[in-house]
């Protein structure tokens, strides 16, 4: 019978009305409904409970539920707004909304800051910056020397830490990103303007194939 409308959507824990989510995000109601179909497929890929667990998130990103990565872990943690170890539908849509091309730049800058603020202190420390640089290099399959990494981190940190207090605060981060907007390039996923059933791949260019995510699934 096809995918049907939101009126016939099966409710799962954390379900929110598509009209409400569309009003609070850059997505339209029909796009939220398409995201729900994707969410249901992902959230039942390993544990059939209508919630995305970290293993399912890893599987969607890397096709390997056991491949740990600091970047993916941080994305999961930030999507898990309630901090209860799973991603609910409302959290999924609201978090993805930050990556929409039409989302406010301020939201993207704030999300990226939290991504680097590993210890959630409200500041980015040098070691946190280094850890994230190493994680991003790893996922990009770029291999550079330890000295080169230290040089990148030192240059970036010294330029961003304009107050010279050994940490980057939100105000300094905003100014730094405004100077180097490419730093938040990963915070925009152009194809969120044209929702399909492919999971957004934040770093690796891995997409779950349409055949795996076909909700309509007539199988002909």
Image (cartoon, rainbow, N blue to C red):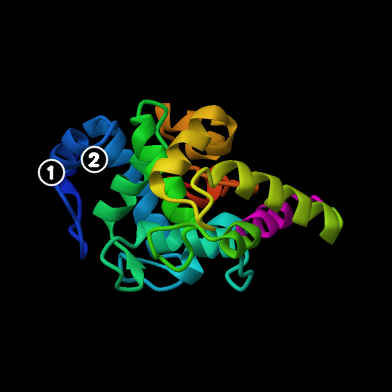
What's the residue at 57%, 70% (across, down)? Answer: 65
Q: CA distance from mark 1 to mark 2?
A: 8 Å
Q: Image quadrant for the N terminus?
A: top left
- The answer to whether any part of residue 215 appears in the image is no
* Residue that sits furthest to the front in the current view: 164
Q: Label 1's element?
A: helix
- The answer to whether any part of residue 162 appears in the image is yes
What's the residue at 59%, 32% (across, down)? Answer: 182
Residue 134: in magenta span? yes
Residue 194's place in the image compared with 220, above or below, is: above
Where in the figure is residue 153, as x and y percent of width and height?
Answer: 69, 52
Residue 60's place in the image compared with 156, above or below, is: below
Pointer 1 with pointer 2, Cβ within 8 A: yes
The span shown in magenta is: 132-142
Where in the figure is residue 9, as x and y percent of width and height?
Answer: 19, 50
| Quarter-of-image position of residue 160 | top right
**Side of 52 relative to 33 (left or right):** right
Where in the figure is residue 199, as x and y percent of width and height?
Answer: 49, 47
Residue to which mark 2 is pinned:
4
Viewer-closest of 154 and 98:
154
Residue 181's place in the image compared with 64, above or below, is: above
**Side of 211 relative to 105 (left or right):** right
Residue 148: in magenta span? no
Residue to which mark 1 is pinned:
7
What's the residue at 57%, 58% (across, down)? Answer: 71
Where in the figure is residue 155, as x and y percent of width and height?
Answer: 70, 45
Disc number for residue 216: none
Give the number of the mark in front: 1 or 2: 1
């Amino acid at each position: 019978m096809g995918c049907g409308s939101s009126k016939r959507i099966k409710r799962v824990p954390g379900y929110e009305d598509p009209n409400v989510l569309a009003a609070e995000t850059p997505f339209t109601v029909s796009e939220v409904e398409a995201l729900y179909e994707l969410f249901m497929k992902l959230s039942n890929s390993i544990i059939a409970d209508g919630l995305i667990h970290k293993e399912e998130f890893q599987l969607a990103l890397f096709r390997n539920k056991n491949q740990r990565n600091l970047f993916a872990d941080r994305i999961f943690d930030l999507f898990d707004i309630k901090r209860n170890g799973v991603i609910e539908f409302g959290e999924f849509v609201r978090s993805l909304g930050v990556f929409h091309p039409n989302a406010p730049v301020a939201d993207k800058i704030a999300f990226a800051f939290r991504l680097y603020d590993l210890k959630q202190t409200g500041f980015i420390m040098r070691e946190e910056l280094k850890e994230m640089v190493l994680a991003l290099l790893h996922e990009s399959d770029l291999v550079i020397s330890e000295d080169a990494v230290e040089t990148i981190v030192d240059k970036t940190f010294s330029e961003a830490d304009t107050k010279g207090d050994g940490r980057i605060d939100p105000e300094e981060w905003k100014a730094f990103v405004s100077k180097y907007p490419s730093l938040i390039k990963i915070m925009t996923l152009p194809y969120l303007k044209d929702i399909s059933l492919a999971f957004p791949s934040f770093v690796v260019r891995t997409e779950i194939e349409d055949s795996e995510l076909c909700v309509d699934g007539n199988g002909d």
